[in-house]
Amino acid sequence: MKCTSCGKDNDKVIDSRSARGGLAIRRRRECLDCGERFTTYE
């Protein structure tokens, strides 16, 4: 996933949880280049 701050594609998943009644997965990610943390839903 691209970082929402710097746009680079170098991140790691910090936490994964079920969301929206099990229809999606919420992933908390951290960019390894700038350190920004962001959430994605897959």
Image (cartoon, rainbow, N blue to C red):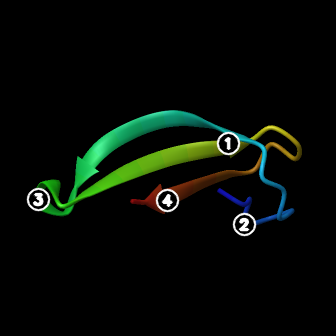
Mark 4 residue crowding within 10 angstroms, few (<14) / some (14–19) / many (20+): few
Residue 40: assigned label: 4
Q: Secondary structure at mark 3?
A: helix
Q: Which residue is mark 3?
A: 21
Mark 2 or mark 4: which comes first in sequence? 2
Q: Which residue is mark 1?
A: 30
Task: Name the residue rendered at 67%, 42% in the picture.
Answer: 30
Task: Name the residue rendered at 56%, 36% in the picture.
Answer: 13
Task: Locate residue 14, reporting x and y percent.
Answer: 54, 33
C-alpha gap between disc 1 and disc 4: 11 Å
Q: Amino acid at mark 2?
A: Thr
Q: Is residue 2 above or below residue 12?
A: below
Q: Which residue is mark 2?
A: 4
The answer to whether residue 3 is left or right of residue 38 is right
Q: Secondary structure at mark 1?
A: strand
Mark 3 or mark 1: which comes first in sequence? 3
